[in-house]
Amino acid sequence: MGALLLLLLFVAHPRVLSAQGVDVQVSADSIVVGDSVGVTLRVDAPGGWDVFHPLIPDTLGGGLDRIGESRWDTLSNNDTLFSATLQFPVSAYDSGVYLLPSIPFILLHDGVSDTLYSRPSLLYVAYAQRDSAVADIMPLVGPLEQGLTLAEALPWVVGGLVLLAIAVLAYYLLRRRRRADEPVVDPRRLVPADEYALGVLEAQLHDRTWRNPGVKHFFTEVSGALRFFMGEVWGIRAMEGTTEEILGELDASAPCTRGQRETVRRILELSDQVKFAKYVPLEHECTQVAMDAIGLVREVGVPEGNVVESDEAATGASLPIKEEE
């Protein structure tokens, strides 16, 4: 029935039907592997007919591939002629002869359908000719080993030193802060005051330190031990006060005898003369000072309640030994 209608249409409009068909144009009939070639399909149909083009698949068969989007362009569309082109690129990745297959186009008009086919085309694909002037391609090898240069190593060395310096500084600050939070222990308060004073005084007498390191060192140690002992036992400001101030406090409030006060006066005044007036005492004077101080400490002792019983009671800031002015 469809063929009869086409025959009647041909009789009625012989010029129109003679214009229909699909023309194939290929930009090149031979390429090298990897190159592409453009395919243009031009379809001509009678005016008033609807023309439907196919979707071109990615693979056209036989190793021929479409490598780009297809493009449909209408060239003419009037009462007498419809003309359009379908363009797309193809390529092949191996050598050989490839067949561009026939592409169908469907025509519809007043319930009548027809199919137009493009003409198959051949495409020759070959490998590119090797240039004889170029040496043979050698197998791929791994990268060559190269020693580390100073310019490459220097940033890492500097960075490592900076990190090390930061770590040392952080450790130092943390340790310093921890030490600042810890209570300062005065070693003189870890034992009873008389034991500490006797230890210092007897060491000065036994070692005869007025000979070496010298009389100034000897009287500094003796007066310092005696001042600490009086401050702990009698509760006076002996470490910070001058000789006159200490004697004044002994007269005012200290529970000491007249003989004990006189011993303190002799030792402190002779100590002032040695340290500030550059007086050089004789050896028997140094010996007598040490023995008098030891006798005073043993005589006074430590009253009940003044003995240190724990480390907690012995903590506190160290008391500086002030030289008398």
Image: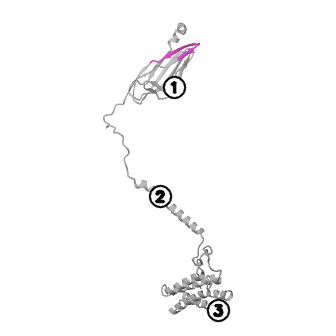
**Main secondary structure along the magenta-highlighted residues:** strand
Q: Which residue is under mark 1?
A: 71
Q: Can residue 165 be spotted in the picture?
A: yes
Q: CA distance from mark 3 to mark 1?
A: 128 Å
Residue 289: % across, % down: 55, 90
- Residue 146, given in percent of the width and then of the height, sits at 37, 50
First along the sequence among labels 3 and 2:
2
Q: What residue would you read off at disc 2?
A: 160
Q: Quadrant of the N terminus?
A: top right
In percent of the image, x 51 and y 25: which residue is there?
71
Please give the range of residues in magenta. Answer: 106-119
| SS under mark 3 | helix
The quadrant where residue 100 appears: top left
Amino acid type, residue under disc 2 in the picture: Gly
Could you give the CA–CA distance between mark 2 and mark 1, rounded to whole angstroms? 62 Å
Task: Indicate yes or no whether the magenta region holds residue 95.
Answer: no
Select label 2 or label 1 by which is in front: 2
Q: Is residue 210 above or below residue 86?
A: below
Query: Which residue occupies the foreground of this view, 325 or 201?
Result: 201
Q: Which mark is residue 258?
A: 3
Looking at the rendered image, the quarter that the C terminus falls into is bottom right
Q: Residue at x 54, y 88 (%)?
A: 290
Looking at the rendered image, the disc whose residue lies closer to the viewer, 3 or 1, is 3
Q: CA distance from mark 3 to mark 2?
A: 72 Å
Q: Secondary structure at mark 1?
A: strand
Amino acid marked by disc 1: Arg
Residue 286 lies left or right of residue 151; in this view the side is right
Q: Residue furthest right?
A: 252
Q: Is residue 63 above or below residue 44?
A: below
User: Measured from the top left, where is residue 65 in percent x and y?
Assistant: 45, 27
Name the residue at 51% across, 10% down. Answer: 15
In the picture, residue 143 is in which quadrant? top left
